[in-house]
Amino acid sequence: MRSGNIFLKRNEVVFVVILSALLLVVFPMALDSFRLNLVGKYLTYAFVALGLVLCWGNAGILSLGQGIFFGLGGYGMAMFLKLEASSPEHTAIQSTPGIPDFMDWNQITELPAFWLPFHSLTLTIVAILVVPAVFAWIIGVAMFKRRVGGVYFAIITQAIAAILTILIVGQQGYTGGINGITDLRTLKGWDIRTDFAKEVLYFVNVALLLGCLLLAQFVRRSKYGRILVAIRDKEDRVRFSGYDVSNFKIFIFCFASVLAAIGGAMFTLQVGFMSPSFVGIVPSIEMVIYCAVGGRLSLFGAVYGTLFVNYAKTIFSESFPELWLFAMGALFIGVVMAFPNGLAGLWQAYAQPWFDRIGQRGAPRPISPAPISPTAAPAERRT
Amino acid sequence: MTEPSSFLLSVEGLTVSFDGFKAVENLSFYVEENEIRVIIGPNGAGKTTVLDLICGRTRATGGSIRFKGKEITKLREDKIVAEGIGRKFQNPSIYEDLSVFENLEISYPRGHSVFGALAFKRDAAVRDRIDEIAETIFLADHLDQRAEFLSHGQKQWLEIGMLLIQDPQLLMLDEPVAGMSVAERAKTAELLNRIIKDRSVIVIEHDMKFVEDIAHRVTVLHQGKVLSEGSMSHVKSDPRVVEVYLGH
């Protein structure tokens, strides 16, 4: 479409309405508080999946280290909540009251300097958004300016995820080690452990997710988004059309990392703790699987894929805990082999044409002068 | 010949070696404004390498390339483009997942920074220019089509169109008519004759009839060195050229 809404095409408005109705009305009404909180937890991964659609699906940059940024966001929020939970009154029995309990257990007697900003909620929120972006920028500059890409980039991000996990586990006194940061209680005095708080946080989470989805859709639909697709197709042509390709890659990698960090922060709030098991290689790869199952070219697909895989994970691991990982592996292989465009691809191939026929019977579609006409651009239609 | 400073492009003593193999050795040539220069030579003579060196895809081991008097040998690729040099690749290099319109739009010389691209608006000026270019490259009826579904010849035209929209002062075309049907070849010659006005062009081509039609001057490369240079008739009568290239 050459003009019109900058965020959405017409059928995407329908998708947004359906997704919003599902997340804001159907789930809260159909699920009990425990299950709703579980869905909220799943949805925090959807932030990461949205970033991966842009980064991997659109720009062709596969990051196997999105757990890094999920973790940075999650730890940022956890540090704030932990400091609030570690007021001198609450920690009076410690040998050094007023510092987090795990520091006390590790014979640390003073709050480390990098914890100090996390006394302030404002600074915490800034840190949640800025720290991952800066970290991604450093990785991006180091890699993309030197034209490292493809599988090498994937391996290096994976290595960084492993390094960060080892660092967190090793520096137990500063980070809470393998247990992570636990026993989080209140946010500015508001108890986040009650059922009511969890419901409120669920709605905040969904609102943020929908906001991020619209923002991601705006990025995709801008000329910048089309340049990403062009870079994926023919990087040299873009370069010799006068673009500094590395800047475009760095930006989308930073953008995806900030989305992941928001997800991480919301994870901490809803689940009540943060640990290295959400930072390393395995969770990072799982996040790629959510995106792949949903369809790596579709933002909506990423959200549904995340919900679907996590739901399946919960069901399976409740009944057959030892088989779950095999099922997950099989699912990934199956998707890659049979449905490379995931759930969204299946939707496009089977459901969409059916709806289009219904729509045409109702009111004939005006022929739009769109360069992305529905028949001409299957890749761009997968939204 | 005029003073060297008035040349649009001056290549002097250009050398590049790949692990000791000198693909281009001590090469010098000059391109004037509005000149159409054709580079011919047998396979492996270093023709494409010369274009790669000028546009920054390959870095020279020695020598200098000056464009409008400015040294561009060490510039980054996109800066060289910004100086006014456009390059067409040998195989049609277009974005298959995008429509013809979007392919052209990406080459439009505005919004080339990250935030410029995010804020880019498809206004009337952009649309008019793209319509105009599409008309020139015979693709006005295909603007909404995915580039993937164009024929080989149409893809070549699209890439030429993507360069035209940049309006470069120096246009470098690597075998623009290779793999085209006879009809497409004639149309391309007509297209090239129209677009080479007001700019300098360097063309690599094997089709001698096509070369004769368009060339002002011809440079013959052989084993990375200039074998002969001059008008087509001069080059054709040069016994060394006949021996290594035309005699085949």
Image: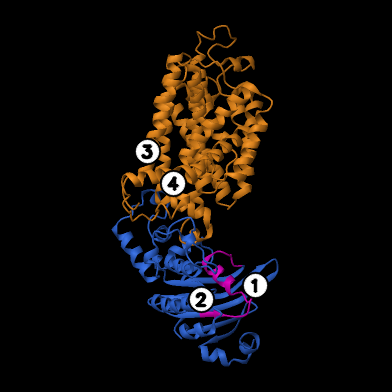
Chain colours: A orange, B blue
User: Which amino acid, mark 1?
Assistant: Ala
- Left or right of residue B72, residue B132 in this image: left
Label 4 resides on the chain identified as A
Q: Residues within 10 Å of mark 1 (few under 14, many from 20)?
A: some
Please provide percent x and percent y for residue A171. 64, 25
- Left or right of residue B141, residue A192 in this image: right
Label 1 resides on the chain identified as B
Mark 3 secondary-structure assignment = helix
Q: Splitting the image into 4 quarters, where does residue B51 fall? A: bottom right
User: Which amino acid, mark 3?
Assistant: Val
Q: Residues within 10 Å of mark 4 (few under 14, many from 20)?
A: few
Mark 2 secondary-structure assignment = loop
Pointer 1 residue: B23
Q: Is residue B219 above or below residue B61?
A: below
Label 2 resides on the chain identified as B
Pointer 3 residue: A14
Magenta-drawn segment: B38-60
